[in-house]
Image (cartoon, helix red, strand yellow):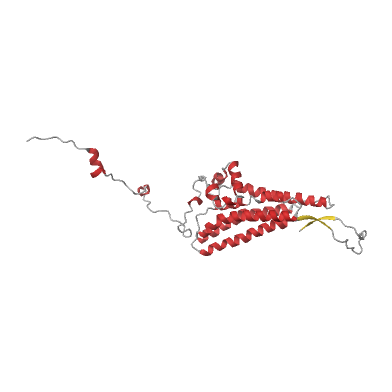
Amino acid sequence: MAYVQVEADDSRLEEGPEGLQFKSFLGTDTRTGNTSAPQRSAGVGNADRGYLADEARPKGTGGFWTVEYYQSYFDVDTKTVLERCYQTMNPLAAATYVPTHLTPADLYGPFWTLTTLIFALFLSSSLAASISAYLGSQPEYDYDFKLLSIAMSLVYAYGLALPVLLWLALRYLGVGEWSVVEAVSLWGYGQFVWIPVSVLCVVPVPIARWVLVGVAFGLSGYFLGANIYPILASAEAKATRLLIIILALLHFGLALTFKVLFFNYYVVDKIGSDISIPGVPGDTPTPGNTTVAARWW
């Protein structure tokens, strides 16, 4: 009887029968004892809004009350800021603005957009009023610096406080995947269209200013609505969508306030003669005398 020596194939023994290999499909978190998956917000449902998370931007090392925590949100170049400002006036890009242009969100652009808008409102309205006063035979014009404080309070309240309040309301309603930084960034960039409109409203033509204010109201309102309504619609409570009506009314109030306070000057002919006041010397009206005066309306 003959014996034949057979060498064992260690590689095939390790692979198992038919070349099968054993792999572990457990996550790496099992080694640390953490096997629970992250829970989504109850108000979002199954909507995939992963681009709303600002995980792509590294957080600062300090707490949220320190400057280092917000330093990364101001790390953006001028070209990116200008591109984001320009795209807010493009209605075709409004629906995809967040995933295309605002990833990750920043605070540098919104801050300077709102600040520039404040000075644009004050300077343009003051310049237009002085021109109207000059054309109306009133060369002396006193600048009203109260308009600057009004513009600052109005713009910062609408561009900073309102998105924060909306974010808090959505958190309370269960929509928790929209970051407060993204809310402020979206609202700040959305007010960029008012800057060129403020400059163009220097023209002393009332109908032109109404048209410009209407265009700015439409562009900025459509931009904000196209980006906010999907977030409201993702909530389980259908009544959350009604918030878009409140936001539209607030936006309309902002546009009307801009028109009344900053873009409401024109030059008119005074109709009739002055009314004499008894006891005031030199106040006798001259028949047929008409002048040109600058008025606000």
Locate the N terminus and report the quarter of the image it occupies.
Answer: top left
Locate the C terminus and report the quarter of the image it occupies.
Answer: bottom right
Q: Position of residue 24 (x, y in %)?
A: 32, 47
Q: Is residue 203 positioned above or below 169 on the image? A: above
Q: Nearer the viewer, residue 235 or 196?
A: 196
**Left or right relative to 222: residue 276:** right
For the question of whether residue 262 can be seen, the reply is: no
Q: Position of residue 74 (x, y in %)?
A: 57, 44
The residue that appears at 59% across and 41% down in the rendered structure is 79
For the question of whether residue 198 can be seen, the reply is: yes
**Left or right relative to 286: residue 83:** left
Q: In the orientation shown, which residue stands out farthest toward the left? A: 1
How many numbered circles does the render carry?
A: 0
Q: Nearer the viewer, residue 94 or 80?
A: 94
Q: Position of residue 67 (x, y in %)?
A: 57, 46
**Left or right relative to 88: residue 10:** left
Q: In the orientation shown, which residue stands out farthest toward the front? A: 92
The residue that appears at 54% across and 50% down in the rendered structure is 98
Q: Nearer the viewer, residue 39 or 202?
A: 202
The residue that appears at 68% across and 48% down in the rendered structure is 196
Q: Position of residue 284 (x, y in %)?
A: 92, 60
